[in-house]
Image (cartoon, rainbow, N blue to C red):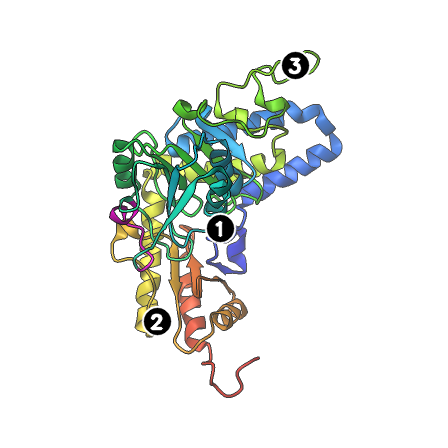
């Protein structure tokens, strides 16, 4: 990770840095496009399918259930706009979702769909609270696997099990967990999922994944179709509108070739670690580092929103510093070579597995040295 040469980079919950293999893949693509044109297009197309297979391996499903999307919002909207809603249907989501997992469901109000927003408990999304707002009208529960502000990791197994027992489907916004934590859809039978590749999977912006289980392919209407949506994709002269029998039917046009090459390169690193050390290795490392940051901050009198149980923890550590403006803490951290964000009224660190103890200490030192709002000489 070349970013480590300059920064203690703790902002993966916003935009992750590219791995060196990902950056090399972009440089190779640019050189090929410049000197070879479309003569190497078949090679680029094969990389797209390689990426599809990598995502399938990552989540434990078939490549036929993988749809490559430009962003999480697109993946969510595929479900929200394509679902066969009826007036009076309801959707249940937790409070405090990122707008990507709010607006598409609100947009169904014009179709007579009611959105029920469930209050969180100190940032926690609990199954009992969700199901207290479920009734016979509820068709779907949509939630983030990991809260972007709280860092709380929801118990997907319990939520999916209880939802399916009542005939309710589950959509998961997995952007803050995928690439770090293990999710085997053969065990955790989520119906729909979407995530970007530019955070924890260390890819470029503009490319992500949606999972649409095969049993639901014909449930969702293809609201956007194009030449790439059909079986005989390259039959331009005699086009036939017969949709692909896979989630690729939701990919209407040209693929993001450079993005696919780069994301595939970074995902290859993640999958190699999982194969060598087990599917939980990255997540365990991340939780250990995040817990360590919580302990170090506590030692200087700063509390975090970190959940008590490891199973509920993630790489996100959000905290408030008494008498310090979060923006001022972030500026001080940047001055000392540490990258974090301001979110949800606090400072948010997003810690990945390649981070180390020195990265954590650089942030703690920056927090400790941030002047209070009333300090003389405080920068404006």
Q: Marks 1 and 2: in contact by CB < 8 Å?
A: no
Q: Nearer the viewer, residue 271 or 290?
A: 290
| Location of mark 1 (residue) | 99
Mark positioned earlier in the residue sequence (2 or 1)? 1
Instruction: Give left or right: position of 255 versus 330.
Output: right
Mark positioned earlier in the residue sequence (3 or 2)? 3
Q: Is residue 58 visible?
A: yes
| Location of mark 3 (residue) | 239
- Label 2 and label 1: CA atoms lie apart by 29 Å
Instruction: Give left or right: position of 212 versus 309.
Output: right
Q: Residue at x 47, y 29 (%)?
A: 66
| Location of mark 2 (residue) | 302
> Which residue range is magenta in the image?
122-130
Q: Residue at x 51, y 43 (%)?
A: 107
Q: Is residue 196 visible?
A: no
Q: Could you say whether the residue bearing mark 2 is in a helix, strand or loop?
A: loop
The percent coordinates of residue 109 (x first, y second) are: 48, 42
State which mark lies toward you, 2 or 1: 1
State which mark lies toward you, 3 or 2: 3
């Amino acid at each position: 990770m070349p970013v480590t040469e300059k920064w203690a980079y703790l902002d993966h919950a916003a935009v992750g840095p590219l791995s060196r293999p990902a950056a090399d893949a972009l440089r190779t693509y640019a050189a090929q496009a410049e000197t070879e044109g479309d003569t190497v297009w078949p090679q680029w197309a094969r990389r797209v399918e390689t990426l599809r297979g990598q995502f399938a391996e990552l989540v434990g499903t078939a490549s036929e259930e993988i749809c490559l999307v430009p962003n999480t919002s697109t993946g969510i909207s595929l479900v929200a706009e394509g679902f066969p809603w009826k007036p009076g249907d309801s959707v249940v989501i937790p409070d405090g979702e990122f707008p990507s997992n709010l607006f598409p469901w609100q947009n169904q109000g014009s179709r007579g769909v009611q959105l029920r927003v469930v209050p969180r408990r100190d940032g926690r999304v609990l199954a009992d609270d969700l199901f207290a707002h479920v009734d016979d009208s509820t068709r779907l529960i949509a939630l983030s696997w990991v809260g972007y502000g709280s860092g709380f990791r929801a118990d997907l197994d319990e939520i999916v099990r209880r939802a399916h027992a009542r005939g309710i489907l589950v959509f998961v916004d997995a952007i803050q967990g995928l690439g770090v934590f293990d999710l085997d859809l053969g065990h955790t039978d989520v119906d729909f999922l979407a995530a970007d590749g530019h955070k924890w999977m260390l890819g470029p912006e503009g490319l992500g994944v949606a999972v649409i289980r095969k049993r639901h392919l014909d449930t969702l209407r293809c609201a956007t179709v194009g030449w790439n949506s059909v079986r005989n994709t390259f039959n331009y002269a005699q086009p036939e509108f017969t949709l692909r029998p896979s989630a690729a039917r939701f990919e209407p046009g040209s693929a993001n070739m450079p993005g696919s090459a780069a994301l595939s390169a970074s995902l290859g690193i993640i999958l190699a670690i999982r194969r060598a050390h087990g599917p939980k290795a990255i997540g365990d490392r991340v939780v250990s580092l995040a817990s360590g940051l919580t302990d170090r901050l506590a030692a200087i009198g700063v509390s975090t929103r970190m959940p008590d149980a490891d199973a509920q923890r993630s790489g996100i550590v959000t905290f408030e510093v008494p008498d310090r403006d979060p923006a001022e803490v972030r500026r001080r951290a940047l001055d000392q070579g540490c990258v974090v964000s301001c979110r949800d009224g606090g400072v948010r660190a997003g810690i990945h597995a390649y981070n180390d103890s020195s990265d954590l200490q650089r942030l703690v030192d920056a927090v400790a040295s941030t002047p209070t709002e009333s300090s003389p000489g405080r920068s404006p």
